[in-house]
Image: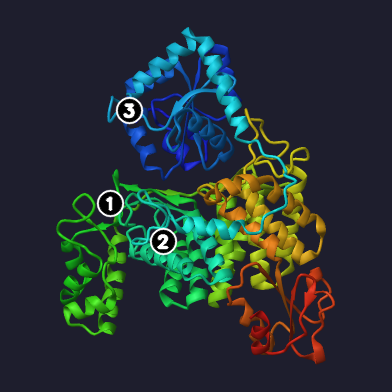
Amino acid sequence: MAPANRLAHETSPYLLQHAHNPVDWYPWGEEAFARARAEGKPVLLSIGYSACHWCHVMERESFENPEIAGLMNDRFVNIKVDSEERPDVDDVYMRAVQLMIGRGGWPLTVFLTPDGRPFHGGTYFPPVDRHGMPAFPRVLDAVSRAFHDKPQDVAKAVSQLVAGVQRSEEAAVSDVALDPTLPRRAAEGLLGHVDTVHGGLGGAPKFPHTRAFQLLLRQWQATRRQELLDAVALTCRRMADGGIYDQIGGGFHRYSVDARWLVPHFEKMLYDNAEIPRLFLDLFQVTDDPAHRRVVAETLDYLLREMRHESGGFYSATDADSEGEEGKFFVWTPAEVAALVEPRDADLVCRYWDITDEGNFEGKSIAHVTVTTEQVAKLFGYSPDDAARAIADARRRLFAARSRRVPPALDDKILTSWNALLISTLADAGRILDEPRYVAAAAAAADFLWTQVRLDGRLLHGWAKGRSRQDAFLDDHAFLAGALLDLYEATGENRHLARARELADALDARFHDDAGGGYFYTAHDAEALIVRTKSGADGAIPSGTAVAAITLLRLHAFTGEEHFRARAEEILRLYQGAAAENPFGYSTWLEALERWAEGAIEVVVVGPPDAPDTNTLWRAVATRWIPHRILVRVAPDASDVPAVARDRPAVAGRPTAYVCRNFTCSRPVHTAQELLALLE
């Protein structure tokens, strides 16, 4: 093992993975750029994340290779960045590489001038010429020579790239009226891209794209067009049966390399396992299908069991590899199954999960479901109940045996934005499924972020190994504010609403673009990069700007304060043109537009907190799928209530519910039946 380099002092698991490379790595910071300026060298910027399979491949092939490392050290100042720790840096240079080569991804390899401006880049480079890709040493030599021998060419490339990245940020608040038909037209367009055999959008590789399918589900509710619901149900069913879903331990892998959801990239990301259950939860409320509820419960239970810090926050990811092999932790052979389950059940279990001698992944099998429990019962002469019991028993045994394997590496940093996505899901799941432990876990995670991932009243981006660092970004504020509103709706506790307002105020004070409208990704006093980005498009996670618009509209409904709605409308006007051109990339923005156009359905339940009749009224709406509604539960004698609940008394001393929309309220009602009739 090489001696430790500067990364040994970092807290990021990804950076620590590279702490013993022979490369003279620097973390992102002025020290590296000062050396580059002093020595007249270009900067090699390498960006990745801990669960990235091809990042590990490039490390093994190049960064651990003494000859290649020597070339890097001789010709460049080398900087390693965790894309999850510094999403601002990643965003800027990812845009530059996409302009250069038409695509992006990790590992991201970018060559910079000593002042941080990009002039060449790519993604993964092999150590030798392979599959049409140039060898990394050859790239290093060519880039170094160009930097020193062709400064005019480098300056031209820099000028074009920086201008291109700046142009990608150009958007202006439009005077054109907002078009409330956009979400419906977007859903119609997306429907044409649905894989009608396997679900999902398009072919391989296949990503969950949960926000797009939530758009389809909301538009089904608005139009009752059956094809929209069918597309969502098919996609959820195929994902739940596929290898992208961990059939043994619960939770979803990152994406599928094929169109059938069979072979995943095996990393598990917190944001996927926060977002995907939300889609299943919505679908469960629509269909009442227990299979969808099971996926929600298994995924959240996996997170609570394996991804939760003792203080309440949730870790970021687990790796695709274990013992140096991709997927080794997750795959099976028939012999392994036969050694673990009841002898009479082995063939049935292998048939149910398609575990064969030939395998479906490098000689072994990824468990996935190709037959129903009823079908496999009939094949093997079992009753459906006995087959279900055999499969459940096998799952427990395989899970216990798998737990004794060497697990994939854990990225144990706790990110505010990703935790906030999960807090929202846990709060909603606890409310909808009547599972208080999920709500309790959501509250504990929120309290952890509020007490441990802030400094002097300012939110921070993350926490690792007992240390909080890095100022928070737009996503952190917007996602956490929204999550706190979800917690408020699930608990009725005012502290969550108060904290959400505080974050919205911070967002306005520290991120708002007073000249151009909308919100920057970084705060006004953050480190200045070559471009200050501002975007309304979704990526691997939802757009922070779009989530901010939704959250501001919700706050307007709770408080009646017009400035929240005005800021949200500004965001909608800023990105309407882009969303009309690329609705797929603006699914979350379209949700905000729906909420703006339709207005919130405001449901207020007033009654003693512990009274059964109060709870009956509250649960009648708390478990029902009503897009764009807000839910408030207050005690009759409460003095500190949001504006939407003021002047809403408990009539005749009985628990009472009100339904309001567009400044018009229903008569007060006292029974669940009357309340549901109003909601219809």
Sequence-first tag of 3 and 2:
3
- The percent position of residue 13, horizontal first and vertical second, equals 46, 42
Please name whichever residue, 246 or 36, is drawn nearer the observer in this view of the structure: 246
Seen in the picture, residue 241 relative to 419 is either above or below; the reply is below
Residue that numbered label 3 is attached to: 133
Residue that numbered label 1 is attached to: 328
Q: Residue at x 75, y 51 (%)?
A: 567
Q: Residue at x 67, y 64 (%)?
A: 485
Residue that numbered label 2 is attached to: 251
Sequence-first tag of 1 and 3:
3
Seen in the picture, residue 440 relative to 568 is either above or below; the reply is below
Kind of residue at disc 2: Gly
Q: Residues within 10 Å of mark 3 (few under 14, many from 20)?
A: few
Tell me the element at label 3.
loop
Q: Residue at x 79, y 64 (%)?
A: 559
Kind of residue at disc 3: Met
Seen in the picture, residue 112 relative to 15 is either above or below; the reply is above
